[in-house]
Amino acid sequence: MAAEPTQGDSSQELPSGIAINSSIPPATVARLILYARELSRLRREGESHVSSKLLGQLLSVSDAVVRRDVNHLGSMGQRGVGYEIGPLIGQIRQTMGTNLSWKVALIGAGSLGNALMRYRGFDEQGFQLVAAFDTDPAICSRNIGGIPVLPLEQLESTIVAEAVSLAILAVPVDAADAVAKRLAASGVVGILNFAPRTLPKFPGVCVVNVDLASELQQLTFAVVSQK
Amino acid sequence: MAAEPTQGDSSQELPSGIAINSSIPPATVARLILYARELSRLRREGESHVSSKLLGQLLSVSDAVVRRDVNHLGSMGQRGVGYEIGPLIGQIRQTMGTNLSWKVALIGAGSLGNALMRYRGFDEQGFQLVAAFDTDPAICSRNIGGIPVLPLEQLESTIVAEAVSLAILAVPVDAADAVAKRLAASGVVGILNFAPRTLPKFPGVCVVNVDLASELQQLTFAVVSQK
DNA sequence: TAGATTGTTAATCGATTAACAATC
DNA sequence: TAGATTGTTAATCGATTAACAATC
């Protein structure tokens, strides 16, 4: 078993007495992540406070939704003033688990895998891409974007040795199930799945799907239905 | 103005008298797209019919949800028998607009853009990637995955000349707003946005966002909250 | 104090679930 | 006919909106 993400302070304890985690609605979770993104930008631009009204405008949601969402983190605002940006970001990160240091493996170093290895956004959010894996010997034992590409045979041993907890699955659709099974068996607790296919369920393993073709179809529906 | 997707029959007429489009819930739209994916697979495997129960199991939703979703397309099933796969796929595609032929431009031929150019999934769903654009002269006037990479200056003229209606935005975050504006002005009606940033709104232009770092954060939340 | 903005309530809206009559 | 499965209803659950008292 590998898995647990690590940090300076113990990962399961709650540093402050703030009401926590217990079932935040999925819609709220999705928005909180976007709030954090926008708040970081505001902070970079030198802002120290933000109101629910402004934050809502930046993301096209109502101010009431922002307040309600933020309240799931505990009471963070000051009436008449708004929210202090720094602590708010911190509280969102803690709730989302992004204050922890997650080690990530990438499976499949094809064109999509390649792009993901070079993608800076993961690093910026504190994710550590420690290794990539592929079946093609021609691309193994090379470094791409600073990340070593290893033969798929070394999947299990590397995950355990490096204490990898998350995996990005970017293999051809027909290989997805088998690889997911191996990941689950190795102790990975989360899979970001780019294969256009519903993976079987493994106990203790969360899956988030990203299907690029589906997204484009969502777009065409939005277009044809708007008129 | 470029834009309108084309097909044999006129795109706005409704070939059959089936109840149509008028406001299908977003949650249903997302699932219908996945149903179509799964149905195509079943058809490839030689199946001709499917029940709401089976389709639901394949996607981890209840049979009642499947029936309700499918009913938004009109009455497609036969009691005691189930749904005929072929017509059901056809009806979903028509409702989603994926029976039309959409021309797509890709803006940004960096690592992500590169991967998207090589990605086969778009083609398989009937999307036609006609050109990519980049500011870097070093990668322009080359073909990547069979798609010409052109200098960004030719964006507007190409969109109009080729009647491109959709765009995939894979440029650095700081360039996103400006490029989106040019896309909207050129008559593009939909943008699939990979830049981690909320784009300004342009009338008549739909946007679907894909933020890879956000997806990974969704995953960490799922992991930390499941225990 | 006066203006601004939160936290929270009650009302509305939308989506899911369970159940079952209709019917192939 | 008997078994299976749809289409649809009513009940429940969840999310959003509007409003406003609390309070900085």
Image: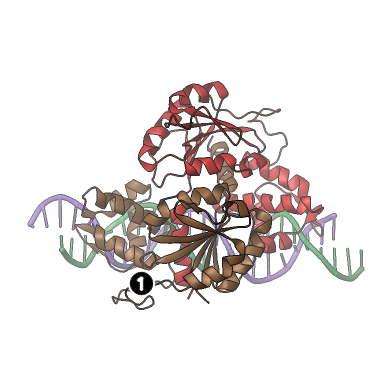
Chain colours: A brown, B red, C purple, D green
Observer-nearest of A54 and B116:
B116
Q: Chain of mark 1?
A: A
How crowded pointer 1 is (Cα within 10 Å; few <14, some 14-19, many 20+) is rated as few
> In the rendered view, does C19 fall on the left or right side of A203?
right
Q: Position of residue A27 (x, y in %)?
A: 45, 59
Kindly identify the residue that appears in the image at 68 percent across and 34 percent down: B14
Kindly identify the residue that appears in the image at 62 percent across and 55 percent down: A137
Q: Which residue is mark 1?
A: A7
Q: Secondary structure at mark 1?
A: loop
Observer-nearest of B128 and B185:
B128
Instruction: Relative to A49, say whether B201 is above or below.
Output: above
Q: Position of residue B103 (x, y in %)?
A: 59, 31
Q: Is residue B64 visible?
A: no
Q: Is residue B28 visible?
A: yes
Q: Position of residue B95 (x, y in %)?
A: 64, 42
Residue B153, by quadrant, is: top left
Kindly identify the residue that appears in the image at 25 percent across and 60 percent down: A86
Q: Identity of the amino acid at label 1?
A: Gln
